[in-house]
């Protein structure tokens, strides 16, 4: 899993690792331009040096970093099995996705449940199964232990079917 986020620490990386996944973070808070160009060489390096199943690679982003990741998903969708998006301000164009799985995890302040359901249904028509973890009582930034735990559980269930 390659993570494109800012320099904020979140609980999920530890959960991914504890569940048996590799988790790579590329910090790009202040970098302009197409940092997506850096993701594919990093991925190639990891695949050549670690025992990574190329059929199980997901891209992850949170909040304001999801638009750039959405573009990467749309232009290089063949690389990923799917994606995990936390509190995205926008969704990727489902007509440009070449993978079949997407997890959208958002709080009540992000989107209404109807907007998320509408996207899920439209994506399904394009062959993309969207799993939605909608936390009505959580904000855009999750602060409560219960919300963070629910988010971690949604990701683990999505990745490993647990």
Image (cartoon, rainbow, N blue to C red):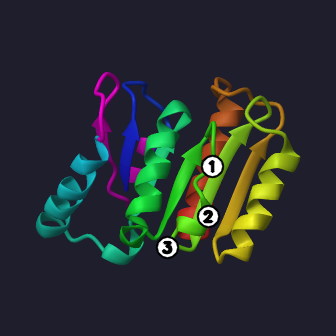
Disc 1 to disc 2: CB gap under 8 Å: yes
Q: Position of residue 100 (x, y in %)?
A: 57, 74
What is the quadrant of residue 87 in the picture? top right
The question of residue 30 being in magenta is answered with: yes
Q: Position of residue 35 (x, y in %)?
A: 28, 41
At a point 63% along the width and 49% down the height, the residue shown is 91
Q: Is residue 148 left or right of residue 138?
A: left
Secondary structure beneath label 3: loop
- On screen, residue 125 above or below 8: below
- On screen, residue 13 above or below 32: below
Secondary structure beneath label 2: helix
Q: Give the label on residue 23, or none.
A: none
At a point 35% along the width and 25% down the height, the residue shown is 29
At a point 72% along the width and 72% down the height, the residue shown is 124
Instruction: Let me know if residue 75 appears in the view.
Output: yes
Q: Is residue 98 left or right of residue 17?
A: right
- On screen, residue 1 above or below 6: below
- On screen, residue 91 above or below 107: below
Q: In this picture, which residue range is highlighted in magenta?
A: 13-34
Task: Say which label, 3 or 1, has the lower sequence index.
Answer: 1
Q: Is residue 23 left or right of residue 135?
A: left
Q: Position of residue 2 (x, y in %)?
A: 35, 51
Instruction: Let me know if residue 19 appears in the view.
Output: no
Q: Disc 2 marks which residue?
A: 94
The question of residue 14 being in magenta is answered with: yes
Q: Disc 3 marks which residue?
A: 98
**Mark 2, residues whose alpha carbon is within 10 Å: few (<14), some, or many (≥20)?**
many
Between 115 and 138, which is closer to the camera in this rendering?
115
What is the quadrant of residue 157 in the picture? bottom right
* Quadrant that contains the C terminus: bottom right
**Mark 3, residues whose alpha carbon is within 10 Å: few (<14), some, or many (≥20)?**
many
């Amino acid at each position: 899993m390659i993570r494109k986020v800012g320099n904020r620490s979140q609980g999920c990386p530890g959960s991914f690792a504890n569940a048996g996944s590799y988790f790579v973070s590329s910090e790009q808070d202040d970098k302009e331009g197409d940092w997506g160009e850096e993701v594919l060489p990093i991925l190639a390096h990891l695949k050549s040096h670690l025992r990574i199943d190329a059929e199980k690679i997901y891209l992850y982003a949170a909040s304001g970093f999801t638009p750039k990741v959405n573009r990467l998903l749309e232009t290089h969708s063949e690389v990923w099995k799917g994606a995990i998006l936390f509190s995205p301000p926008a969704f990727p164009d489902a007509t440009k996705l070449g993978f079949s799985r997407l997890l959208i995890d958002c709080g009540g302040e992000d989107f209404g449940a109807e907007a998320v359901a509408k996207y899920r249904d439209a994506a399904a028509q394009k062959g993309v199964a969207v799993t939605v973890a909608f936390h009505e009582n959580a904000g855009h930034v999750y602060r409560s232990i219960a919300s963070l735990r629910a988010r971690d559980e949604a990701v683990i269930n999505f990745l490993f079917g647990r």
